[in-house]
Image (cartoon, rainbow, N blue to C red):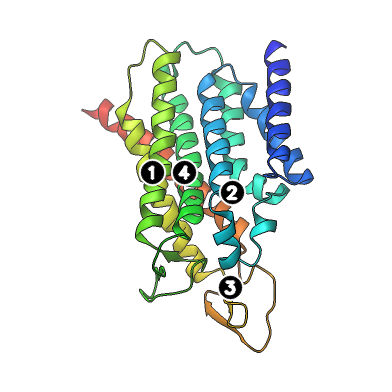
Amino acid sequence: MSNFYFAAALSTLVVIYARGGKSLSPSGAFAAFLLGMSTFSSPLWFFTVVLLTFFVVSSKLTKFKAERKRLLEADYDHSSERGFIQVFCNGFTGGVLVALHQWHYQDLSCFDQSPWSVILLWGYIGHYACCAGDTWASELGILNKGWPILITRLKKVPPGTNGGVSPLGLAASLAGGATIGLVAAFTLALEQSCHGFAWEIVLLGALAGLGGSLLDSLLGATVQRSLYSEKRKQILPDGQEGDDKTIAISGLDWLDNHQVNLVSSVVTSGLCGAAAWYLDSSIEKF
């Protein structure tokens, strides 16, 4: 019961902080509270610290260089305040994984006593590393001095184009994922004396951040439409139609940005979990 009260208190503080900083809309605050209750009620600090790291740093980056971003993105003020769908798509996989781990393995004295426990933890790291990599790439990559390059055609496109990649964005995605991996490894080393500092988790986070961001860009360039207003000199938000001076830069109108984020995080999380399973099987065979 004490975990429940702790989760409720911390979730409430997170929501108050986010609402004060205009990082969450009312509906987004509700979704964040539910995600917090699922995550913060775990007896393992690992899950809580990883989520808080992703949330706090990403919120700060969203507000970084806000005035310049407003000139490049038509919906900056709206998109910087995350709603229910955006929080859901960025937190659903992580919430499910922590719930599964708590349900099955809350009594483990060390997470690697069970192969499936390791798989769930690696999947969790992969999820938030992917989300961090994509968020950091979006929030910092748009500030790249030169125009990004469309990942499928290798041609320059306006900043904010779905599927556009830049050196700054790629470096940011790698750094975002590595940060999640570093925080995860550090927390586990402090929390569980049976396990030393796991540098492989830092590498996992870095690869998941970069790989997840590239997957997100590939989907953004192919199954997500990007419209550019020549009149406003801005990329238009999903679902907004332009005028006769609006051109379609890339992609099909199949998925929106939130759906692309969800697919990318689910795939990246699954691949990280599969990597944990493969490595465990290889060790047993050896």
| Quarter of the image where the N terminus is located | top right
The residue beneath circle 3 is: 234
Residue 15, compared with residue 106, is above or below; it is below
The residue beneath circle 4 is: 270
The residue most toward the left is: 286
What distance separates the C-alpha of mark 2 from that of mark 4? 31 Å
- Do callouts 2 and 4 mark residues in contact (Cβ within 8 Å)? no
Q: Secondary structure at mark 3?
A: strand
Q: Position of residue 94 (x, y in %)?
A: 57, 37
| Quarter of the image where the C terminus is located | top left
Which three-letter amino acid code belongs to the residue tagged 3?
A: Gln
- Do callouts 4 and 3 mark residues in contact (Cβ within 8 Å)? no
Residue 63: which disc?
A: 2
* Badge 3 or badge 2: first in the primary sequence: 2
- The nearer-to-camera label among 2 and 4 is 2
The residue most toward the front is: 67
Q: Going 50% across and 56% down the picture, which residue do you hit?
A: 138
Residue 75, compared with residue 84, is above or below; it is below
What distance separates the C-alpha of mark 4 from that of mark 1? 21 Å
